[in-house]
Amino acid sequence: MAGRINRAIELLAQDQAIYYVGAHTGHILTRAQGSEDAGIWADYLNVGMEHGAFDMTGLGDYMAGLVDGGPARSGHRTPAIIVEAPVNGTDEANVRYNAWQFRQILGRGVHGVLLCQAETAGAVRAFVESCRYPHHPEGVDPALPSPLARMRGAPTLPSPACGGGSGRGLRGETGADAPPLLGAGTRGRGSEATAAAIWGVSEAEYRERCDPWPLNPAGELLLGVKLESPEGIAHCEEILATPGIGFAELGPGDLSLALGYLEMPRDSYPAEMREARDRVFRACRSNGIAFLEIGTPRNIVGKLDEGVRVIAGHSEEAARIGRVHQRRTMPV
């Protein structure tokens, strides 16, 4: 019997690496394909909608198929499903205007969302807030007006702690060292009937458990960001300090193109990309965020020993070697 709904979170909480499959486009979203994928060797499946079709009917059918074909041998109802959202995290306004995408995606019962091209902390904060129900208090600035005060006309502009500058921390700290804080969640009721059915819980339980981990230790939602532009790298420390993010990656394809490489360097990054990679990895480690990177049968042991915990590359053999190396006990 699984200990959690989200297999990826259960493993990360044990400091076990997670392995995924799924391209940036072309995922077959049918009920039959979901049933076939239910027994896949990977810990989660990535569904690319940044470049792939934004197909909510197909995604709903696919999630139902995963339930049909389950449970997984690990005891989980389904493998975890993480969707790359179409909107890019270039700025806060862009993310807030497109928050409907997160609501649509989460309403199909997925287990996580990836925000691509994250470039500012404000955009990432808006992403996290858009994926949360408003009754969850973890990480929310206590200096903000209460819901009742807002109903009676209190200003709703974010406090300095939410918007940068001379922030106010959770315990009254001020200045640059104050921990970053969130505003209230903005996701509303309405999609629980479909999402809870996929998770196998009541609608009330879904509202309690669909919250970002590790910000909420009981949360079952895994949120990630991709830093793949020069601007994203420049702001990676403040971006990755945003509460609610569970994993992050350097996007070598788009970053290398922006830096003038027409072919993406794969085997060995040039100096400037290595600098970017190491900077993002350090920021992940400083904030307790899992770092995503490609792993192969040849290098997986070194990646794991370095601390990489989300493994791309679509290699079942790399996963087999890595799981043995980490003495993983959860069935595949």
Image (cartoon, rainbow, N blue to C red):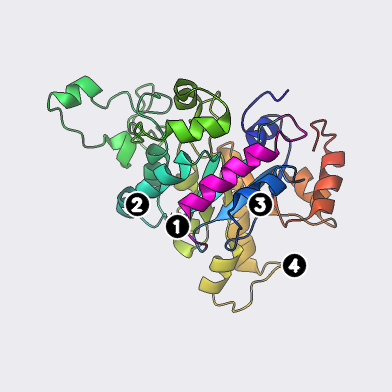
Q: Nearer the viewer, mark 4 or mark 3?
A: 3
Whether tag 4 and tag 2 are in contact, CB under 8 A, the answer is no
Label annotation for residue 86: 1
Q: Indicate which disc, 4 or 1, sits on the residue closer to the N terminus.
A: 1
Q: Is residue 269 left or right of residue 51?
A: right
Label 1 crowd (10 A; few <14 / some 14-19 / many >=20): some
In x, y percent, where is residue 104?
Answer: 42, 45
Write down the residue under mark 3. Answer: 33
In x, y percent, where is residue 6?
Answer: 62, 33
Label 3 crowd (10 A; few <14 / some 14-19 / many >=20): some
Q: Amino acid at mark 3?
A: Gln
- Per the model, the C-alpha gap separating discs 1 and 3 is 22 Å
Look at the picture and state if 37 lies above or below 332: below
Residue bounds of the magenta highlight: 52-75
Q: Is residue 102 left or right of residue 92?
A: right
- Per the model, the C-alpha gap separating discs 4 and 1 is 28 Å
- Could you say whether the residue bearing mark 1 is in a helix, strand or loop? strand
- Could you say whether the residue bearing mark 4 is in a helix, strand or loop? loop
Q: Nearer the viewer, mark 4 or mark 1?
A: 1
In x, y percent, where is residue 318?
Answer: 82, 52
The residue positioned farthest toward the left in the image shown: 153
Write down the residue under mark 2. Answer: 98
Whether tag 1 and tag 2 are in contact, CB under 8 A, the answer is yes
Q: Is residue 8 visible?
A: yes
Q: Is residue 156 left or right of residue 284?
A: left
In x, y percent, where is residue 39?
Answer: 75, 42
Q: Indicate which disc, 4 or 3, sits on the residue closer to the N terminus.
A: 3
Q: Indicate which disc, 3 or 2, sits on the residue closer to the N terminus.
A: 3
